[in-house]
Image (spheres, rainbow, N blue to C red):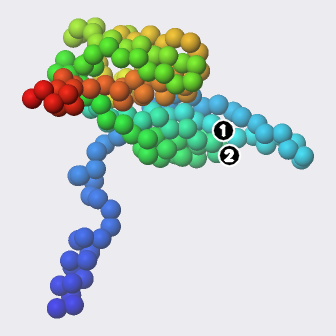
Amino acid sequence: MSSDLKKVNKKSSGRKSNSQEVKLVERLIKIGRVSKVTKGGKKLSFRAIVVVGDENGKVGVGVAKADDVVNAFKKAKTDGRKNLVNFPITKSLTIPHTVTGKFGACKVFMKPSIEGSGVIAGGAVRIVLEVAGVKNVIAKQLGSNNLLNNARASVCALESLTTKSQVLKKRNLN
């Protein structure tokens, strides 16, 4: 009897199996060397900005600092997994409607595009859209050139996307 319980506990305990877990893609936006001036001199560390997504409507931006590049990348990757957001994608792999995202002094404008046009965007916005799985879109970043704020503004824009059915349900027009 006790052996049966042990088998049941082994099956139920632990993490999810790899078959259920979604495969996420990580892309590095920037590795920056930062220094802190202390009494003993300068302390160098590295800051990594990473975009994590499943290329199917899920994306997140992570930032982390560490004493070496590898640990900074790992920490930023886990931070990006914590900040994942979902958004709708159309059949032609574009966004449903025009949207603007703001974060800090950055403003990102995104517009759906016809199939085959590709991702027309620059800098961090392009990386975010590619990792998110959007294949046909036109985007323009306005305001600041800060990579982190542009990436976060594009995630804010994607997060505010809605579908026609969601709007109808919200307005009780079924």
Give the residue furthest to the front.
172
Callout count: 2
Question: What amino acid does circle 1 point to?
Answer: Phe
Q: Quarter-wise, where is residue 137 in the image?
A: top left
As rendered, which of 169 and 131 lies closer to the eye? 169
Q: Quadrant of the C terminus?
A: top left
Q: Quarter-wise, where is residue 2 in the image?
A: bottom left
- Marks 1 and 2: CB-CB under 8 Å? yes
Q: Secondary structure at mark 2?
A: loop
Q: Residue at x 24, y 82 (%)?
A: 6
Residue 67, numbered circle: 2
Q: Residue at x 50, y 16 (%)?
A: 107
Residue 166: x and y in percent read: 20, 30
Determine whether, in the image, residue 54 is placed left or right of residue 71: left
Determine whether, in the image, residue 164 is placed left or right of residue 13: left
- From this view, report whether residue 11 is shown above or below residue 41: below
- From this view, report whether residue 87 is shown above or below residue 75: above
Residue 5: x and y in percent read: 21, 84
Question: What amino acid does circle 2 point to?
Answer: Asp
Q: Quadrant of the N terminus?
A: bottom left
User: Disc 1 marks which residue?
Assistant: 46
Residue 32: x and y in percent read: 65, 31
